Image (tube, coloured by chain):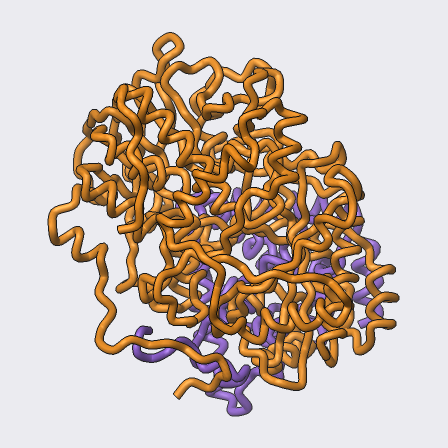
Chain colours: A purple, B orange
Amino acid sequence: MQTSRRSFLKIGVLGALTLAAGGAIYRVANPPQPGRFILDGEARNVLAAVIPAMVGSAMMPADASARAAAINACIERVNGAILGLPLTTQKEVQDLFGLLALGPARRFLAGVPDGWSSATPQQIDAFLQSWRTHRIGMLQTAYLAMHDLIAGSWYANPANWAAIGYPGPIKELS
Amino acid sequence: MRNTNIPIKTSSGPVADPIQAGLAAGWNVTDCAQLERDGSMEADVVIIGSGAGGGVTAETLALAGLKVLIVEEGMLKSSSDFKMREAEAYPALYQESAARKTKDKGINILQGRTVGGSTTINWTSSFRTPTDTLAYWGKQFGLKDYTPEAMAPWFEMMEQRLHIAEWTGQPNENNDLLRRGASKLGIPTGIIHRNVNGCWNLGYCGMGCPTNAKQSMLLTTIPSALQHGATLLTRLRAERFVFKGDRIDALECLPLSADGLQPTGRRLTLRAKHFVLSGGAINSPALLMRSKAPDPHGLLGKRTFLHPVTISAAQYEQRVDGYAGAPQSVYSDHFLHTGPIDGPIGYKLEAPPLHPVLLSSTMSGFGNEHAKMMQQFPHFHVLLALLRDGFHAEAPGGSVALNSSGAPVLDYLISDYVWDGVRRAMLTMAEIQFASGAKAVTPVHEQAPSCTSWAQAQQVIKALPMKVLATRVVSAHVMGGCGMSDDERLGVTSSQGRYHGISNLSVHDGSLFPTSIGANPQLSIYGLTARLAAGLAQQLTGQPAPRLVAA
């Protein structure tokens, strides 16, 4: 964890360049469809890894299949939330997931050495903490976008209200 | 059963939906997403926007016998659609799914995008424009006839029209904690006036009132205008004005897809003798910019104000249940009046409603730290400080520009002068929260820990780096950008709301304000636009304008 923190600090300008190039490479490989966000397989893997780290293990169901179902429900809600954003914002989010799907960006910018599916909780925590406080503003905004989308989508789900003691709106009118 | 200590008042039987009833009775309402061919329409007056300014203007002009067309980018949603669920309400009723942001993404902006505009989703707080704000406008922008005395009849008329009165219910605990904490410190508070009639005290004003108690434009002026023959066009984006000499010849509009995200490809051209722009303080300047409206002094879209808001969250032993009860009922203006208006920035204190999506996304941090905080949800109390921008050279507001697709982007930089106010406000809020018995206080900042004593909070807040993205800053009040002054070097609109250099265009919305208001702006917009609309009705008809009265 110490190593990955230090390697983040070294990224600096190089990191910004990689980020810009990553976006460009991603766009060449996936020509922009002037349209809506598409949640592809690797974006799902990113979300499946990041959701429990963002929301916290304390909120996750103990049972493995219930946990997987809760994470999947959150992924669907994140997808739905993104699809309600202006198309220019949807494209920014698409670029973010495209970047995270690129091996070099994942390794050097996110500090996740192997694929997202095999990332350890410690690696994801370190990734979130480093982007949260990164001196490259774009990575901070990327962290905040993931924070707001994931936390918002998790707690939008009535299934997750009991855990926070929220009774929900009165039944008669909702 | 409802697990809360907040009493609600219910009525028996189902809630009637007056909008559905009006549609069934034959109101002229067209959902432009459904239009299958291009077209054109004509009226005496085209009003762009159905929020506070557009609603008041539409009713005034329709009662005066003018043929009115109202253009609204959002959908027509009403009480039978309002299910008090954030996941549905934000995409359906807010600009950019309630995630509209400033250019550097440092400030999240809550603004309505539905019939009724922000009045459909606001928290009902109603304040007359503060006297010192009006005095500043007179001194700095030459708005000499905007005295409290000259405005009073218009505020009175709109207060009567919209049932605006001091909230007589018991403040919910989230608001009462502000009253009790401030009182311990000798800080005066007041009770908020609200535009409600038969409020159930549910706490879901921000998701559209499910009981039709909130006297928003959706329930008052817009239905009245439709009753008097106005036409409402929804899911229609006002794209650009076409000028002929110094007049607007037409307004080109783009019908939007049902989800509101992109034009359908159809076109609608609207012609009128007069146009009234009421799109709000980001979209109004943007339409004028897309239209290349005259702006010889480079003022259009400049001086856009936000009342930047800083947030302090606190935990209590007892349940607070901040999701239930009238969302805002207690306020303090103490820190607006401790110094001169153009001295160190002043701030207004209020409490916000707390719902899971808004709270969880607003509170910083992740993982179990965030989860532990959310587990305390019913015990949370949150305070807001709204900073009064626009009264000092170091708080000049932001500026609106257009992105490559012609959509508005607000560039708003927070100066050290404003950050100083954020820090002072965080200190004030933490002190009040500890005074009212908080176990812990968390200033909403990426680097702020949960503090368990006032001494610790002071130390923490004094050391916090005040930087964008690290400090959570939000806004629900967008003002300015088409500022008023009869001196064309100081404002793009006249004191009568007429756009300088265009003979048949008025601006009637919060973009007229030459500074921020220093209070929740809805009643300022109602009073000001009621006055401007009456003047316009008289000019267009040659008759005295009708008065607006409650139905």
Compare residues B383 and A25 and report the one nearer the observer.
B383
B318 to the left or right of A169? right
Q: Residue at x 21, y 25 (%)?
A: B42
Residue at the extreme top of the image, as rendered:
B245
Q: Is residue A69 visible?
A: no
- Residue B119 image point, x, y percent: 41, 51
Quarter-of-image position of residue B30: top left
Q: Residue at x 80, y 72 (%)?
A: A1
Q: Is residue B287 above or below residue B329?
A: above
- Residue B316 image point, x, y percent: 67, 81
Total labels drawn:
0
Rendered-image quadrant of the N terminus of chain B: bottom left
Quarter-of-image position of residue B302: top right
Q: Residue at x 53, y 50 (%)?
A: B127
- Residue B107 image point, x, y percent: 62, 49
Residue at the extreme left of the image, as rendered:
B25
Compare residues A158 and A167 and report the one nearer the observer.
A167
B138 to the left or right of B214? right
B351 to the left or right of B271? right
Q: Is residue A173 above or below residue B548?
A: below
Q: Is residue B109 above or below residue B255?
A: below
